[in-house]
Image (cartoon, rainbow, N blue to C red):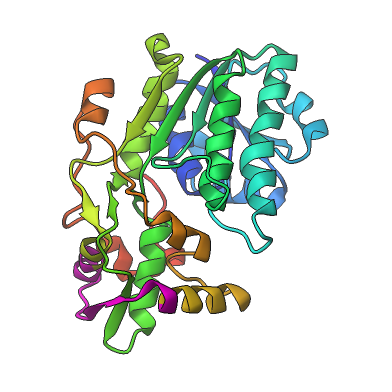
Amino acid sequence: MSTILVTGGSGFVGSYVIPELIDGGHRVVALVRDDASGGRILRRLDAARRGAVELRRGDVTRPDTLPAALEGIDAIVHLVAIARDRNGGADLRSVNTEGTRNVVEAARTAGVRRLVHQGALGVRDDPSLQYASSKAKAEALVAVSGLDWTILKPSLMWGPRDGFFNIVADLVRVSPGVVPVPGDGNARFQPLAIADMARIVRATLERPETIGGRYELGGPRYWTYREITGEVLRGMGRRRAIVPMPLPIIRLIAAAAEAVRLPFPVATDQLRQLRLDNIGPLDGVERAFGFAPRPMEGQLGYLQRRTRDQDPPA
């Protein structure tokens, strides 16, 4: 049994990774910023699993809070990241890049050698792409850390309480018979089931041969943005016309949504990212981890309920 520190345990990915690690016989220490975050983690676990989780206070953007959290830790699963900000990219740099730097430095100081880092598929260090640049820089920091690292790079992830697919569903709920998609709707993604991602994290920790590896992770087929929107509609049991919208127009809508802090499927920064496909090898998961990822077709029925009403992981 290993003792594993999980950052971002109260988030979407963390809420699936923590029970998967517990079921694998590991002890989990969840890094939480406040009582509310810790409460979310514990509420999503049954009584038996709660006994295998310890909550420790800390914040990846505050390096002074990390040494105490790393006491007695064998490995770190670093999941903390944000996808967008309203501060010109400063928050993305603070959390995604500098937060990762702080975790790496704290691990080296504490003598914790094993680090599994969640990167992202299709990112590159391009100053015009704030999110992609912040994640690419974080991956580079991990790669030169001298630790026993593995970088996992998933595409969009789907499952109850996900981010992207639930935001599209919310847009469907308020749409007047049509759902816009950016540009021609042909940007490609490779959605991965969140349960498969959790399984991969556990396997990565348990297989030393993954040390030093970068793994591009996606589901068994490529989906265009337009096809994803159609699958969301099927999952919800709704009928809408899917209408391509010129990027300059949808960029204005996204910017207006950001200004008044309304959810929208893509941020202005992410619209720039759409010029890059978010895909990897179709056999990547099976080749690296020995199982075929589950298809997304017919599996989005949870979108019939709003995010707050979707079931926690079993």
What's the residue at 72%, 23% (across, down)? 106
Q: Is residue 200 visible?
A: yes
Relative to 142, say whether 161 is above or below: below
- Image label count: 0
Read off the magenta span.
Answer: 230-249
Q: Please name whichever residue, 271 or 45, is drawn nearer the observer in this view of the structure.
A: 271
Expressed as whole percent of the image width and height from the top left, the position of residue 122 reads 39, 42
Q: Residue furthest right?
A: 64
Q: Is residue 114 left or right of residue 163?
A: right
| Quarter holding residue 304 | bottom left
Relative to 214, say whether 165 is above or below: below
Expressed as whole percent of the image width and height from the top left, the position of residue 155 reads 36, 44
Instruction: Determine if the magenta segment contains residue 234.
Output: yes
What's the residue at 22%, 53% (across, down)? 223
Q: Please name whichever residue, 212 or 251, is drawn nearer the observer in this view of the structure.
A: 251
Q: Is residue 52 visible?
A: no
Relative to 5, say whether 154 is above or below: below
What's the residue at 66%, 60% (across, down)? 88
| Quarter holding residue 28 | top right
Q: Residue furthest bottom?
A: 176
Image quadrant holding the C terminus, namely top left
Expressed as whole percent of the image width and height from the top left, the position of residue 165 reads 35, 61
Q: Is residue 299 left or right of residue 34?
A: left
Instruction: Determine if the magenta segment contains residue 235.
Output: yes
Expressed as whole percent of the image width and height from the top left, the position of residue 105 reads 71, 23
